[in-house]
Image (tube, helix red, strand yellow):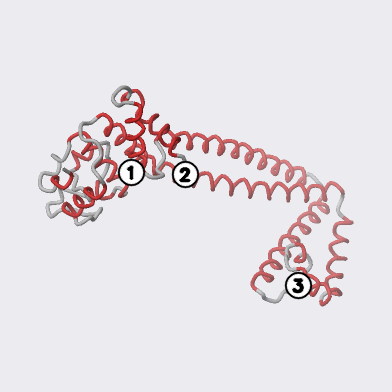
Amino acid sequence: MRSFPSSAFRRRRTGVVLGTVALGLLATWGSFAAADEIEDLRGGIPTGEEIREEIARLSSDRDDLLTALNTAESDLTATLDARDRLDDEQRRLAAEIEAATDLLRSVAVRAFITGGSVSDLELLLSVRDASDLSWRRDLLRNHAGSSEIALSRLRDLRARASDEVRESIEQAARLRAEIERLEADIGAIEEKMNDARAIEPLADAWDRAAIAIVEGSYGIAPAEKWAKLRFCESTDNYQAVNSSGKYRGAYQFDVATWQTVGGTGDPAAAPPAEQDARARELYARRGSAPWPECGFYLE
């Protein structure tokens, strides 16, 4: 996700999270100091609002791409439908030219990448895709005769094809390439959306913790104290489950307490950063009391 290097920006961002709930609870400088401490805790984790704005932006971009994809697919269908209305000879020529071109490119590129051999006919269009100039020159020098035969055959096919067929082939190729690009772009955007949705609970957890730290009576315990608490509770194991199965995760939440700080599901299955955030919210509101045996490490 985004990085936020500016401390002033981070303070403004955290101020948005704290909102009117925190207004008037701290002096201006105190608010900035608390904001910096909260940002140090959450690191580069964005706010829930930022995540939702990003998802909305990505969704809008995906909708635009889907519209473009539908248009390209409709245009391709129309192009192929128009070709189907040609006479049998022209349809046959179009199919033969397209099939030969696709096969030649595919085989030639594959042979070039793997270093394998290719037949004279397969070499026909490979020079369009090879990036090594010396390889191209060697290719043309050693296979000029057979390549010229294949080229002559292709020229003959194209000469026998009507202008309409040639235009149809070129248009279909452009549209297929556009469809492939759009599908790849849509897939990339959907992957980003899934990533954003996956960290939304984490972002919301830190938003809640930020508000609790300002609202509550206990503030922020130093990191070294939290490390000692975790070791006491779970030997610093975020997936720990006690012998009864009731207390779970690094901070040994029971499910009911976990839910009071916004958690869902199994505390021990939550990401470490989410467990950290919810433990800090709990401490900010209730102090060390939720950890009757190990809580003294936070004092």
Q: Position of residue 45 (x, y in %)?
A: 40, 43
For disc 3, the marked residue is 135
Quarter of the figure with residue 107: bottom right
Q: Position of residue 137 (x, y in %)?
A: 81, 72
Which residue is at a point 28% across and 50% down the rendered structure image? 269
For marks 3 and 2, give the CA distance.
44 Å
For disc 2, the marked residue is 3
Q: Earlier in the sequence, mark 1 or mark 3?
A: 1
Q: Earlier in the sequence, mark 2 or mark 1?
A: 2
CB under 8 Å between callouts 2 and 1? no
* Left or right of residue 2, residue 121 in this image: right
SS class, disc 3: helix
CB under 8 Å between callouts 3 and 2? no
Quarter of the figure with residue 129: bottom right
* Left or right of residue 222, residue 150 in this image: right
Which residue is at a point 42% across and 31% down the rendered structure image? 12
Residue type at mark 2 is Ser
SS class, disc 1: helix
SS class, disc 2: loop
Q: Earlier in the sequence, mark 3 or mark 2?
A: 2
Which residue is at a point 19% across and 45% down the rendered structure image? 253
Residue type at mark 1 is Leu
Query: How many C-alpha atoms fall within 10 Å of the one at disc 1: few (<14), some, or many (≥20)?
Result: some
Q: Position of residue 116 (x, y in %)?
A: 67, 76
Report the front residue among 77 and 21.
Answer: 21
For marks 1 and 3, give the CA distance.
56 Å
For disc 1, the marked residue is 41
Query: How many C-alpha atoms fall within 10 Å of the one at disc 2: few (<14), some, or many (≥20)?
Result: few
Report the front residue among 89 and 93.
Answer: 93
Residue type at mark 3 is Trp
What number is the disc on residue 243? none
Q: Nearer the viewer, mark 3 or mark 2?
A: 2
